[in-house]
Image (spheres, grey):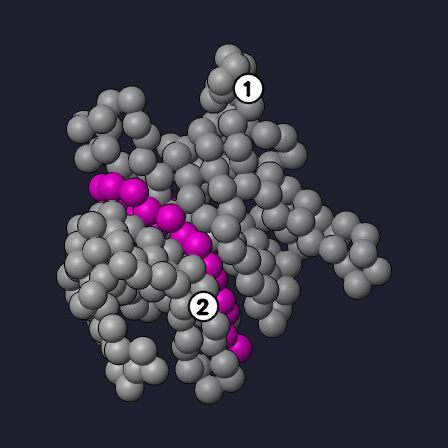
């Protein structure tokens, strides 16, 4: 883990440090158990955290760093070349998912999560077995999907996503969630029966509804 911020060339002004994510654990008395930076040399943002029954923190967010720390990754490299080709001045983000050991001194797994455009992890939950459920938003038509899928293809413009990762960092399933306009999934919860609830926002008139209290 990192004791210092990495990025030193973001700005403005010149030399302004880049954003890093961080993870801090407090003990029941309110004292620091551990606290660490999490990121690379470009901007990184942590957006969601959940804790397993064994005390491991699972963190999701977004990163522009090609040197973001990875351990047993599902995706080993930042995948954003469609943005840099079309708009050389713009750097797309990928989502990330990182699981820390209970001590905070090492990573159990850490991976990029995204495709060739803009991707952000926005929320995460864990079940009693330690599986992680990550949600967010994506512009990437090639965002990784794996059956059983709720929605196999990109709906349009911006979609939400939901991805499940095993305790050791393997991919269980992954799906788009959205319609033909802008959608994002920002929160997720899983209960003891492994029932999953997600929430977010949509501009899509064709967003999928089942037994709706508001059908349109």
Label 1: which secondary element: loop
Q: Where 205 sits versus 4, above or below?
A: below
Q: Position of residue 116 (x, y in %)?
A: 22, 41
Main SS of the magenta part reads strand
Q: Is residue 26 left or right of residue 106?
A: right
Establish if 153 lies above or below 104.
below
Reading the image, the residue beneath label 1 is 16
Res. 176 visible in picture: no
Residue annotated with mark 2: 188
Read off the magenta span: 110-128
In the rendered view, tell whether residue 10 sits above or below residue 37. above
Q: Position of residue 158 (x, y in %)?
A: 25, 52
Image location (x, y in percent) of residue 100: 56, 54
- State which tag comes first along the sequence, 1 or 2: 1
Between marks 1 and 2, how big is the CA–CA gap? 34 Å
Quadrant into which the N terminus falls: top right
């Amino acid at each position: 883990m990192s004791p210092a911020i990495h990025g030193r060339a973001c700005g403005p002004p010149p030399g302004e440090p880049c954003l890093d994510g961080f993870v801090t654990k407090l003990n029941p008395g309110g004292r620091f158990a551990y606290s660490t930076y999490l990121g690379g040399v470009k901007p990184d943002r942590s957006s969601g955290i959940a804790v397993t029954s064994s005390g491991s923190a699972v963190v999701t967010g977004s990163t522009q760093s090609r040197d973001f720390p990875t351990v047993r990754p599902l995706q080993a490299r930042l995948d954003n070349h469609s943005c840099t080709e079309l708009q050389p001045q713009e750097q797309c983000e990928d989502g990330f998912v990182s699981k820390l050991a209970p001590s905070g001194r090492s990573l159990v797994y850490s991976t990029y999560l995204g495709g060739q455009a803009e991707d952000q992890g926005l929320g995460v939950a864990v079940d009693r077995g330690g599986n992680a459920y990550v949600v967010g938003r994506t512009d990437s038509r090639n965002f990784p999907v794996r059956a059983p899928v709720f929605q196999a293809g990109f709906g349009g413009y911006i979609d939400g996503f939901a991805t499940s990762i095993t305790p050791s960092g393997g991919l269980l399933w992954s799906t788009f969630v959205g319609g033909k306009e802008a959608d994002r999934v920002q929160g997720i919860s899983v209960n003891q029966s492994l029932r999953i609830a997600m929430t977010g926002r949509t501009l899509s008139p064709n967003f999928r509804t089942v037994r709706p209290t508001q059908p349109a």
